[in-house]
Image (tube, coloured by chain):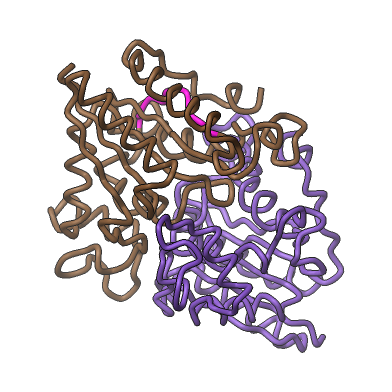
Chain colours: A purple, B brown
Amino acid sequence: PGKKVLIVYAHQEPKSFNGSLLKIAVEELTKQGCSVTVSDLYAMQFEPRATRNDIVGHLHNSKEFNYGMETWEAYKRGDLSQDLVEEQKKVQEADLLIFQFPLFWFSMPAILKGWMDRVLVQGFAYDLSKSYDCGLLQNKLSLFSFTTGGTKEMYSNGGIGGDIRYVLWPMQHGIMHFCGVKVLEPHICYAPEHVSEEKRKEMLTAWTQRLKTLWKEEPINCSPEWYFK
Amino acid sequence: PGKKVLIVYAHQEPKSFNGSLLKIAVEELTKQGCSVTVSDLYAMQFEPRATRNDIVGHLHNSKEFNYGMETWEAYKRGDLSQDLVEEQKKVQEADLLIFQFPLFWFSMPAILKGWMDRVLVQGFAYDLSKSYDCGLLQNKLSLFSFTTGGTKEMYSNGGIGGDIRYVLWPMQHGIMHFCGVKVLEPHICYAPEHVSEEKRKEMLTAWTQRLKTLWKEEPINCSPEWYFK
């Protein structure tokens, strides 16, 4: 109640299963009295490429372009491009970040990876020696909610795709934990395209149910043990 | 000698350390008599977003856009957008794929992830029950060559970033192995921005040396044991 939530959403089609999961989250969290903001990346035609265009005006070193260095300097000067400033403002205000997307190639779709690459710049999300438990985005929670093409069996220990937690390491630990953001259990809907309509409905209901008690959840212990045992 | 190599390169600056690694690979492999093609993604302004624009003409199901389904159908009809057709032709002809990039957030930069998302479509790179050892891109080799921000100590077992092999799982196993492509040992240059000029030169020399005997290397055993012991 009164909590702020940013949902970063990466699917092209509102009628998709991901679209339904988004809709449920917006409705349920709003009903709880949360203030919900959605960054609908495809609808925004969000730019995933990390280029010189992200810096307004002059470069710190125009002879040799270094994206990390330039965005860090631009952040300090207040010279990041407007689309990044807006996303950073949303992140800054949020108590909870939900990422809603279909798993593409054991990872995020490029448009969402581009959001991570461009929004979470040095100075804003982390800094020299301010990373992991000392990251700059502390007192925030994150939750990765995604669909897969493969079944749960494929993504189990001993399955051909390996334990699903292996693919969570770069996203949860390498990005969120690095920035100091705590991580809630991921929410995974396996192979919604290959199950019955009834099973799909059950998956949607399960998401609604989880959201009802989300604020009572404890973050995971985001260390190698959680991922690799 | 006579081998074909495709280098997919994702750095904005030719004068960067990644640019030097690219230059070395082009020169050394050409000297060996290989035919080398470079996809310079930033220079090409390669599109990372997976959208309806990737399909020329009508959609299979225009009521509900499903990117995987539509690109699969478009591939079969010969209706993928021209930039994808060109990249697929380069992949098809290559004996070896080298990916050269700076590690961004425990993964590839979004522009390179977009290359994977858009180029390796169903029907071309894999198909129903044609994945992993039966993937459609067999008899090809791949090599991930990248630089990191963090040091080797950070990316060791027990280090805060975990074993570097953890971040290789989605890229090498989830993408290349899934498509039937064999994987050579990765080539990792740790923290080139934070070492001496002399150390940087040593790293460049080591890359040249490795390339001299590259064709004698055996692929890794791309199974969970290699990554997680």
**Above-or-below relation of A98 to A161:** below
Q: Is residue A35 magenta?
A: no
Displayed quadrant of residue B56: bottom left
Q: Is residue B82 above or below residue B143?
A: below
Above or below residue B40? Residue B37 is above
Residue A15's x, y, as percent? 43, 75
In percent of width and height, residue B7 lies at 30, 37
Quadrant in which the C terminus of chain B is drawn:
top right
State the image coordinates of residue A90 (x, y, percent, origin top left).
Answer: 64, 80
Residue at 19% x, 40% y is: B90
Q: Residue at x 71, y 64 (%)?
A: A142
The residue lying toward the viewer, choosing from A78 and A33, is A78
Residue B183 drawn in magenta: yes
Q: On the picture, is A122 further left or further right than B77?
A: right
The total number of labels drawn is: 0
The correct choice, above or below, for B34 with respect to A86 in the image is above
* Residue B34: x %, y % from top left: 19, 23
Quadrant of residue B64 within the rendered picture: bottom left
- The residue closer to the viewer here, B222 or B213, is B213
Q: Where's the N terminus of chain B, which quadrant? A: top left
Q: Residue at x 77, y 57 (%)?
A: A130
**What's drawn in magenta, residue-wise?**
B180-189
